[in-house]
C-alpha cells in the first residue's frame, strides 16, 4: 500500500520540487545579474567622478603654479 502510494505521489512531488527549483534558480540568477550590472554602473560613475576631480585639481595647480614659483625666484633654491 505504501509503495503504491509512493509510486503515484513520488513523480508528482519530484516534478513540483524541480519546477520550484527552476523558478527559484532563474529568479536568483536574474537578481545576481542585476547586482552585477549595478556594481559596474557604480564603478563607471566613480571613475568618471575621479577623472573630473583630477582634472579640476590639475587645472587649479597649473593656474596657480606661476604665482607660487615666482615667490622663490632668485632665492637660491635648487629644483
Image (cartoon, helix red, strand yellow):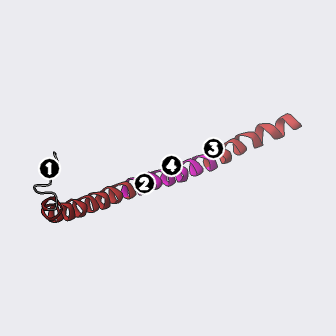
Which mark sits nearer the N-terminus, 2 or 1? 2
Q: Are marks 2 and 4 in contact (CB under 8 Å)?
A: no
Which mark sits nearer the N-terminus, 2 or 3? 3
| Distance between the alpha carbons at the discs numbered 3 and 1 | 83 Å
The image shows residue 40 at horizontal and vertical percentages of 38, 53
Q: Which residue, given by chain and number where applicable, does mark 3 sit on? A: 18
Q: Residue furthest top?
A: 3
| Distance between the alpha carbons at the discs numbered 2 and 3 | 31 Å
The relative height of residue 35 versus residue 8 in the rendered view (above or below) is below
Which mark sits nearer the N-terminus, 4 or 1? 4
Identified at 21% across, 59% down, the residue is: 58
User: Which stretch is magenta?
Assistant: 20-41
Identified at 67% across, 48% down, the residue is: 16
Mark 1: few, some, or many residues within 10 Å (few <14, many ≥20)? few
| Distance between the alpha carbons at the discs numbered 4 and 1 | 67 Å
Q: Which residue, given by chain and number where applicable, does mark 2 sit on? A: 39
**Residue 63, image quadrant:** bottom left
Identify the secondary structure beneath mark 4. helix
Specify whether residue 71 is painted magenta: no
Identify the secondary structure beneath mark 1. loop
Name the side, left or right, on which 78 lies relative to 15. Answer: left
The relative height of residue 67 versus residue 74 in the rendered view (above or below) is below
By secondary structure, the bulk of the magenta-drawn segment is best described as helix
Identified at 47% across, 54% down, the residue is: 35
Amino acid at each position: 500500500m505504501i509503495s503504491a502510494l509512493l509510486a503515484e505521489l513520488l513523480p508528482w512531488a519530484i516534478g513540483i520540487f524541480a519546477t520550484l527549483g527552476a523558478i527559484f534558480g532563474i529568479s536568483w540568477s536574474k537578481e545576481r545579474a542585476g547586482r552585477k550590472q549595478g556594481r559596474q554602473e557604480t564603478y563607471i560613475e566613480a571613475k568618471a567622478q575621479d577623472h573630473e576631480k583630477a582634472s579640476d585639481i590639475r587645472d587649479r595647480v597649473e593656474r596657480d603654479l606661476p604665482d607660487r614659483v615666482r615667490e622663490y625666484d632668485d632665492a637660491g633654491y635648487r629644483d
